[in-house]
Image (cartoon, helix red, strand yellow):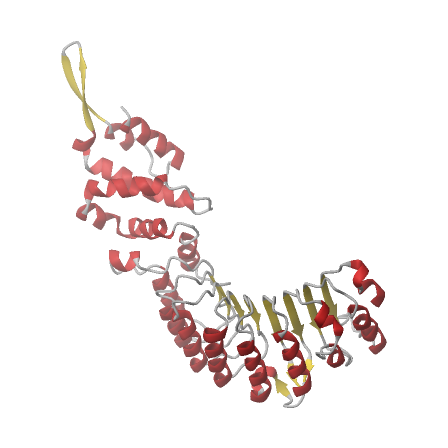
Amino acid sequence: MGHILGDATHLSDLGILNNISGEAISMMDEWALYSGLQHNRSMQNLHFTGPLPGMFTSFVHPSNQFWRRNTFLVDLGVNGLELGRQEMKQLCTVVTKLKNLEALGITHCWSRDGDCFLGEDDDLFSIFLRTLVDMKNHPLKSLELQGNAIGSDSMNNLVWTIQRCCPDLEELNLQDTNIGHCSCNALASLLRNPSSRLSSLDLWSCSMDDDCALLLADALRHNKSLQFMSLGGNNFTWKGRKAFSTLLCNKSSIEETFSSNHTLECLGSNDDLSLHHLLALNLSDDKRAMAMNKVVKFHLSELLVIMGVKLLPNIMTTLGTKQNDSCHESCRLDLLSAMFSIVRNTPALFQYVSADDGNQDVFDIVDGLEKMRFDASVSDLTVALDRGLSV
């Protein structure tokens, strides 16, 4: 099979996966694959999934001409492999030479020397961290490290390295990693960093508790980049879920609601319907409109007392904003309902005089609006308001 992987095929995506049905790939087959790959010049995405018979060490040697011919590789992943000091050093040397690498994954790997997971072998993990330092000028956007049992000290060093050497990182996957309170502190510092571009953080099944949830929620109060955080499979109770509910919409005051987090759109699988509802409110490109929508939704009576008709221009401006997302219709309904309340409670503002044969009669636009159902569609409310305000 190796010959089809050569230069003539222009193959750009390849995954080498050990047979999951129980019939393992043979040493000869592995050698044939690697021999063919040496002649490839067009590879962009390459993934290895083990366990593999043992030729991987020779393939990742820096002298292999494959690495010199495929400098445009953008995605490299190794999963489920046994790595010793030699393999890790060779792999890291190769990675630092891939100047266009945007995605790197070293997942569920085992330390052959330490007889433990990669993240539990401090020496092996330090080699990887030094590699990230050497990749400071690489356009690395995605880093996958799930299933490596990264300890608290290693996690602290990882976060420190990411903050200083991976300024463009957008996705970080730490799924199936035993994250303790100390590790959560390190992650919280990353989320508080105003220069962080991280938009996706996977913390699925990381043995986190409510204290971790409180730390993470507090760190996200002023975060403007993180949109997706996977928290399923952790040990959160109502206390942890409440922390994220308050993060998404602090209802204690108008100011707190307006300054809540309007960026986070997903928390992974959870059973709290109120969280799903609050996350749905953030599904908009116009975050200022979403902030106003939350204020109107949860503080409408206060707004009417404080501002009254002064609120109308802001609501009408928000309604006129073009938004192409699934949440905009719900937002428009809330805002139109607010307009409806203002119109109904300020009738004098919407009365007009009609002169007919010398007789003057006062007509009230609100009369037509009050006959409508509050559950009317957005289009019905829009038509009613348009008719009333244009008379």
Compared with 76, 326 (above or below) is: above
Residue 235 falls left or right of residue 59 = left
User: Which residue is nearer to you in this view: 197 or 69?
Assistant: 69
The quarter of the rendered structure image containing the C terminus is: top left
At a point 72% along the width and 68% down the height, the residue shown is 69
At a point 58% along the width and 80% down the height, the residue shown is 128
Point out residue 13 in the picture as x, y percentages from the top left corner: 71, 62
Compared with 109, 372 (above or below) is: above
Residue 340 falls left or right of residue 242 = left
Residue 188 falls left or right of residue 177 = left
Residue 149 in sight here: no
User: Which residue is nearer to you in this view: 338 or 120?
Assistant: 120
Residue 236 in sight here: yes
User: Which residue is nearer to you in this view: 171 or 75?
Assistant: 75
User: Which residue is nearer to you in this view: 356 or 168?
Assistant: 168
Point out residue 93 in the picture as x, y percentages from the top left corner: 64, 79
Residue 341 sits in quarter: top left
The quarter of the rendered structure image containing the N terminus is: bottom right
Point out residue 19 in the picture as x, y percentages from the top left corner: 77, 71
At a point 23% along the width and 39% down the height, the residue shown is 342
**Number of numbered discs:** 0
At a point 79% along the width and 59% down the height, the residue shown is 9
